[in-house]
Amino acid sequence: MFTATSPEQLPDRATILSLSGLEFMQAMQRGEISRPPISALMNYTLDTVAPGQVTFRGTPEFNHTNPMGGVHGGWYGTLLDSCMACAVMTTVPKGSVYTTLEYKVNLTRCIPPGTEILAIGRIDHAGRTTGVSHGEIRGARDGKLYATGSTTCLIMKMSGT
């Protein structure tokens, strides 16, 4: 799987609109489409893709900590936004795109830097104009729950498709 290092390496509009959201995510998993640059910065990768469910695997490092040495809440938020929104994406039809309208994060415990986690997003509702999903961050080895979240995404049919 490669990561785009310039805007020219990201998929173009025609490519995005020619695939369903599930096909797009599967192509990313196979490395045919670049993973988003933020995933390299935040140290996570796409692990599994299925209809209505996406899992990312990641490990927070020292550069993801706050001034007190704990993993920054933005790291939790980024991983949850990614897995929950991508779960919605797996339901988006060809010719449509989505964006996050809002999301909520609940931290249940601190993730020690260097701990591998799984961020799992699951669809709750996939409609014509909105998608709702929930997510969890769990320890990859011990299954400990570190955070939960929920999101609502806007699904938009693009004109000319």
Image (tube, rainbow, N blue to C red):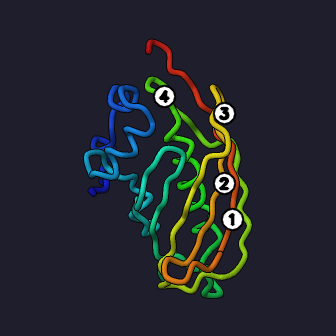
Residue type, numbered disc 4: Pro
Q: Position of residue 148 (x, y in %)?
A: 69, 65
Secondary structure found at label 2: strand
> Do the numbered discs 2 and 1 sit on residues whose CB atoms are within 8 Å?
yes
Query: x and y percent of residue 119 in the render?
Result: 54, 65
Q: Earlier in the sequence, mark 4 or mark 1?
A: 4
Instruction: Residue under label 3, please give it.
Output: 130
| Residue found farthest to the top | 160
Q: CA distance from mark 3 to mark 4?
A: 12 Å
Circle 2 residue: 134
| Secondary structure of the residue carrying numbered label 1 | strand
The reply to whether residue 62 is in sight is no
Q: Which residue is the site of mark 1? A: 148
Disc nearer the start of the sequence (2/1)? 2
Q: Position of residue 29 (x, y in %)?
A: 34, 52
Residue at numbered disc 4:
93
Measured Cα–Cα span from mark 3 to mark 1: 20 Å
Near mark 2 (Cα within 10 A), the count class, few <14, some 14-19 or many ≥20, is many
Rendered position, 78 above or below 159: below
Tell me where residue 67 appears, x and y as whole percent. 63, 83
Furthest-front residue in this view: 51
Q: Earlier in the sequence, mark 3 or mark 4?
A: 4
Q: Residues within 10 Å of mark 1 (few under 14, many from 20)?
A: many
Residue type, mark 2 in image? His
